Image (cartoon, grey):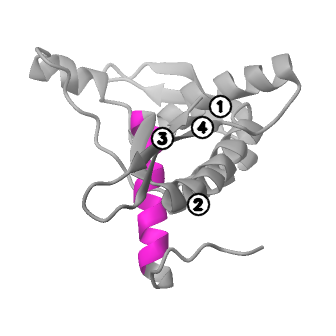
């Protein structure tokens, strides 16, 4: 398979793809050059396919805990299965971590309560929002892939580079 080099050394090119993939998955759409958008499309679709194929792999485990009074309680905890865990690690390696932002007018205590159990918000968004959505879409339409759309925007004023908007469908 031929790789578009984008006029950059390998490390820089991979850092650009990783950064833009993180932004695209977090925000839903970004504006970039057409060449980068075309390279980013395959990069992101591979990550989404990985998440879609493994998002249902969950194991329920019984955990026993002892509270302050010395009473033993049992609760159910859902852990990732081996397939989902491997997918999480691969996606983590191919994206940067993103910090959850405070919503306008949100109190600090509410913000801290909302993000309390979330370690990596981007991974949670991929596995809890995008994967079920695209899996359902695949069942309805009978097709896999095609999770992104590229819209040409014309040329950039400074250097006449072809610009494009890439977005998740």
Question: What's the magenta region?
Answer: 12-27
- In this rendering, the answer to whether 139 lies above or below 7 is above
Q: Secondary structure at mark 1?
A: helix
Q: CA distance from mark 4 to mark 1?
A: 17 Å
Residue position for label 1? 131
Please provide percent x and percent y for residue 11. 45, 80
Closer to the chain start, of discs 4 and 1, is: 1
Residue position for label 3? 25
Q: Of tags 3 and 1, which is closer to the observer?
A: 3
Q: Of tags 2 and 3, which is closer to the observer?
A: 2
Q: Quadrant of residue 54?
A: top right
Camera sees residue 148:
yes
Q: Secondary structure at mark 4?
A: strand
Q: Say whether residue 125 is magenta.
A: no
Q: At 14% from the left edge and 18% from the top edge, which residue is drawn? A: 104
- Local crowd size for mark 2, using a 10 Å CA cut-off: few (<14), some (14–19), many (≥20): some
């Amino acid at each position: 398979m031929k790789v578009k080099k984008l006029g950059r050394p390998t490390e820089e090119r991979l850092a650009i793809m990783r950064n833009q993939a993180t932004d695209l998955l977090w925000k839903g759409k970004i504006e970039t050059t057409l060449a980068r958008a075309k390279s980013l499309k395959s990069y992101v679709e591979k990550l989404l396919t990985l998440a879609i194929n493994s998002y249902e792999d969950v194991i329920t485990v019984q955990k026993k805990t002892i509270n302050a009074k010395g009473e033993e309680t049992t609760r159910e905890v859902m852990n990732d299965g081996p397939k989902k865990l491997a997918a999480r690690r691969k996606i983590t390696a191919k994206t940067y971590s993103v910090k959850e932002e405070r919503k306008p007018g949100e109190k600090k205590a509410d913000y801290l309560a909302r993000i309390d159990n979330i370690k990596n918000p981007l991974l949670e968004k991929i596995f809890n929002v995008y994967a079920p959505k695209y899996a359902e879409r695949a069942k309805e339409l009978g097709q896999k892939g095609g999770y992104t759309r590229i819209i040409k925007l014309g040329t950039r004023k400074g250097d006449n580079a072809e610009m494009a908007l890439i977005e998740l469908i």
